[in-house]
Amino acid sequence: MALRGADLEQGAALAGVTVEAARTDALSNLRAGAARLSQLATDAKVERGDLAAWAPVVAQLSGITNPEAQAEHVHREVYAVINQGAVALNQDGSVAASLEPVQVEAKFERPQVRAMAAGPDYGAAIWRPSPNYNSRPTGSTGDPSMIIIHTCEGSYSSCWSWLTNSASGVSAHYVVNESGSEVSQLVREASRGWHIGATYDCGLNGSKECWLNGVSANHFTIGIEHGGYASQSSFPAGQIDASAKLSCDIARDNAIIKDSYHIVAHGRLQPATRTDPGPNWPWSTYISKINSYCGATTPAGEIIIDSNSANNDASKARFSTAGAWTAGYSAGYYGSGYYYAATEAISAPATFEFYLPTAQTRTVDAWWVAGTNRSATAPFIAYNASGAEVGRVSVNQQTNGGKWVQLGTYSFSAGWNKVQLSRWTTPGYVVMADAVRVR
């Protein structure tokens, strides 16, 4: 019942249950909510047989103070259920409870019909700006590299109204409603939202991005809240679908890896105090939908070798370096960062290996982060599985950064072939080993 503060305490006392039970036990929570709602109706002298007349106390119990959000909560959430009816099922599919539809018009001001500004980063969202944000830090720790999935622990309208209230001291970048029919953007993606109270610990997240350890997770994340609760047994298909479209858009615009280590549960990164979005968030379906909407399904036969071996399929892709290479994270990298090294007359390359079951002719692309200190003659050399050179090309890494650039088409043999980035070229620069694609 989203009971908080005085409503929780008074409801528990009226229902004859403890505050802790009202907070944590479903039946006690419902009884406390009903008792508190009944008390508010008595105080307001509501005619109890008139369902429409209950609307003002429904709004009062919600704790929502924003008038627009109150109207949405009353008409589009509570009274929409009364009008449409509802069915709750047991785990075996049998009916646990049902509410027959009753046509009733709430005696409460309706939501205003007006043009809503589109979200500045996501055109399908409504722009409801929150004052609760600040600037991201400069440098790589401020580049968005993860999306955090939250549940509101309440309704959509109560969620966005609270997150846009300066008194709350919290915010998120987006909120998705229960049905998926509406999304609100509250904070620009380039700004730092206040949605997670934890510093990053890669030990909680599959040992991914450990270079961010000890950094405030708000610095490099984008937060999506969802109307609903971590305790619910399932999430509406429409909500998951709308959220996946949003996550695809965020990931595509910010070069975020689309997997469950970079699109991650709030509860994973802040387990001491949070569990959302809960055990029943459909992660496999969700990540699959994100990749589908982004067109990120890897074409049959295509192999990507990332400079972070954790992102590679070890049965067909691997990466290694020889000599002094340094990890880097400037904006525009593929996967989880890159490696760079000074150019000099030395045989100490970065090696991208890939396995082919048969001899094949393949096209090879490379990805790097461009910059003025990059080599204009970075040498990429392709070898077949027997170690024979099959082609080489020099590329200008001062340009064409943040995208796939074709190196050439070569004839490879069955087994482990490789593409090496050499450092042996004009001194005074660096070469960038980020990712190689074989197609």
Image (tube, rainbow, N blue to C red):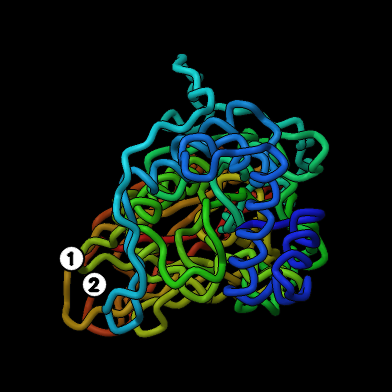
User: Residue 106: where, in percent of width, then height?
Assistant: 46, 33
Earlier sequence position, callout 2 versus callout 1: 1
Helix, strand or loop at disc 1?
strand
> Which amino acid does the dot numbered 1 rest on?
Thr
The residue positioned 63% from the left and 26% from the top of the image is 67
User: Residue 327: where, in percent of width, then height?
Assistant: 68, 63
Helix, strand or loop at disc 2?
strand
User: Residue 291: where, in percent of width, then height?
Assistant: 35, 57
Q: Is residue 417 above or below residue 253?
A: below
User: In the rendered image, is residue 188 in sight?
Assistant: yes
Q: Is residue 89 above or below residue 153?
A: below
Quadrant of the rendering where the C terminus is positioned: bottom left
The residue positioned 63% from the left and 64% from the top of the image is 266
Asked whether, in this view, residue 366 is left or right of residue 293, the answer is right
Q: Nearer the viewer, residue 287 or 362?
A: 287
Per the model, the C-alpha gap separating discs 2 and 1 is: 6 Å
Any mark on residue 103, and which? none
Disc 2 to disc 1: CB gap under 8 Å: yes
The residue positioned 79% from the left and 36% from the top of the image is 134
Asked whether, in this view, residue 334 is left or right of residue 88, the answer is right
Based on the displayed image, in which of its 4 quarters is residue 437 positioned? bottom left
Q: Nearer the viewer, residue 146 or 431?
A: 146
Any mark on residue 412, and which? 2
Quadrant of the rendering where the N terminus is positioned: bottom right
> Which amino acid does the dot numbered 2 rest on?
Phe
Report the residue marked by disc 1. 361
The residue positioned 52% from the left and 57% from the top of the image is 228
Asked whether, in this view, residue 274 is left or right of residue 425, the answer is right
